[in-house]
Amino acid sequence: MSGYALITGASSGLGLALAEALARRGRNLLLVARQRDALESIACELSQRFGVEALFRVCDLSEPLQVSGLLQELEDSERQIDLLVNNAGIGSAGLFVEQDWSREQELIELNVLALCRLCHAIGGHMQRRGAGQILNVASLAAFQAGPLMSNYFASKAYVLHFSEALRSELAPYGVKVSVLCPGPVATAFFRRAHLRSEGLARRELLASPEQIALQAVRGLEKNRAIIIPEWRQRLLPQLLRLTPRALARRIAMRMVRPLLPRAGDEHA
Ligand SMILES: NC(=O)c1ccc[n+]([C@@H]2O[C@H](COP(=O)([O-])OP(=O)(O)OC[C@H]3O[C@@H](n4cnc5c(N)ncnc54)[C@H](OP(=O)(O)O)[C@@H]3O)[C@@H](O)[C@H]2O)c1
């Protein structure tokens, strides 16, 4: 039986673009997210357009019991995952202590714990098989602290460091691990996190998800450790290393503040 690429958060945005880019290259897909209708129509469309097998599984990855259910089902079906794409993620913004704790907890469950758990279970199978590939989606936010988006930035720092370390651990077993660090992308991410993205759009700072997905797939093919899709943004980690951390925090805060909702916005 040929294997599957399991993509989390495949019902929209970057996950959907990654699913399409992988289907175009003939990969069978297992799409995971919460919105059944979206997953069903995406799976149907991609299998018709690219002649691949596209399955889907509804799962709220911020619920540990549902993650267990997904893993158990994979185990029972003996479906082989040869590419795991941990893409599902959410943001939150504003003064951390003023945010709903339930949203902050959901962010950690999804961005950190679910990703870590899928790497543990599916990465374990890959290690025993001596083959497989993992792509974890972090962000450019992973390289620094992000006041006013503190939990989100920290979750992505976790994903970056965890993925780099896992790469070194699994390389001797033939398992490749990469981490994707995009800058701002034109997706529902901003709306869902109650962030304003008009300023970024006006300054043409939003990449298209298709552009990012293409760079991600190319990065995977080259087995890059860290994939930063936009060439200008590749300088950021080096620049940050030379910047005093207090200054980096001030700059990050200045960049996040205009994204916050204002009085009169629906979610302000
Ligand atoms: N957009 C950006 O500027 C940007 C920049 C850097 C990194 N990223 C990262 O890119 C990844 C994808 O985000 P995106 O920009 O494509 O945003 P998006 O369009 O909002 O997509 C998020 C995806 O995650 C899924 N998801 C959300 N909560 C979930 C849950 N509890 N369980 C299962 N799936 C869930 C959503 O599907 P359902 O609603 O159907 O569950 C959706 O498919 C995230 O990790 C994000 O942090 C985004």
Image: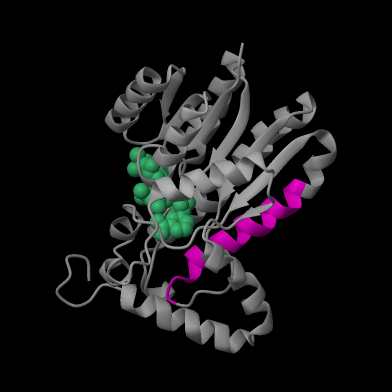
Query: Residue at left 64%, top 39%?
Result: 221
Q: Is residue 212 magenta?
A: no
Query: Residue at left 46%, top 45%?
Result: 62
The segment highlighted magenta reads 148-167
Q: Is residue 153 magenta?
A: yes
Query: Residue at left 58%, top 43%?
Result: 218
Residue 85: x and y in percent read 55, 39
Residue 51: x and y in percent read 43, 16
Q: Main secondary structure of the magenta part?
A: helix
- Locate residue 4: give its quadrant: top right
- Locate residue 44: give its quadrant: top left
Q: Is residue 126 visible?
A: yes
Is residue 186 shown left or right of residue 15?
left
Instruction: Please identify the quadrant where the N terminus is shown.
Output: top right
- Using the image as rendered, state which of residue 49 and residue 111 is in the foreground: 49
Is residue 120 shown left or right of residue 51?
right
Q: Is residue 114 visible?
A: no
